[in-house]
Image (cartoon, grey):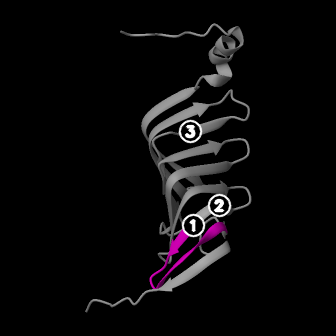
Amino acid sequence: MLLFSCENDMKKVKEFAELKNQPTIVADDFETIYSDSTIILYKLVAKKLTYFEDADPPYIEYPLGVHIEKYDRKMNITASIRSNYAKFFTRERQWEAKNNVVAVNAKGDTLKTEQLLWDDKKGKIYSDEFVKIIRPDQVITGIGLEANQDFSNWKIKDPKGTIYVNVEEEQ
């Protein structure tokens, strides 16, 4: 036996049909490079991109995750970030990355968290969630983080402890 239910709330029907709720662009297996005066700054790769240009505020959603690499002038990767979901607010130039967020800086420090906010205008990244920073000789955990956008200078708001690790070099 199957039962079906329907709702005839006209307000909800109209909201569903409005253009601001519909994507302007949908792309699969998306890859792009951001540059300034022929200098490559970022590379972005995503399995799916959905652009909601008519939303208020307008945003681009990466429902299947995103991988972003930041480069210096010599094309060295200075930072990278990967998450299972992301949203970019185009007008504000702000990112929200969620679900299994991993960021790595040029020194090899790795940040793991469930949510990270990136303000591209200010060049800062933030989190109010649990964070774990893995360095070659230690693991640092805590709640909340503030850092510059290439993750070369960071501060945990409420540190919970440091675990030192002995690392043996292979010869």
Q: Nearer the viewer, residue 13 or 27?
A: 13
Highlighted magenta segment, given as a residue range? 132-145
Instruction: Classify residue 7 as left or right of residue 168.
Output: right
Residue 47 in picture, x, y percent from top left: 42, 41
Q: Which residue is mark 2?
A: 127
Q: Is residue 5 left or right of residue 128?
A: left
Looking at the figure, which quarter contains the C terminus?
A: bottom left
The residue at which mark 3 appears reads as: 61
Q: CA gap, disc 2 to disc 1?
A: 8 Å
Residue at the spot 55% in from the left edge and 50% down from the top edge: 98
Q: Earlier in the sequence, mark 3 or mark 1?
A: 3
Alpha carbons under labels 3 and 1: distance apart: 23 Å
> Residue 108: horizontal and vertical position, in percent?
47, 75
Tell me if label 2 and label 1 are in contact, CB under 8 Å. yes
Badge 3 density bin: few <14, some 14–19, many ≥20, Cα 10 Å: many
Relative vertical location of residue 29 with respect to residue 26 in this rendering, above or below: below
Q: How dense is the environment of label 2, judged by Cα within 10 Å: few (below 14), some, or many (20 and up)?
A: many
The image position of residue 24, as x and y in percent, is: 59, 25
Q: Which residue is mark 1?
A: 131
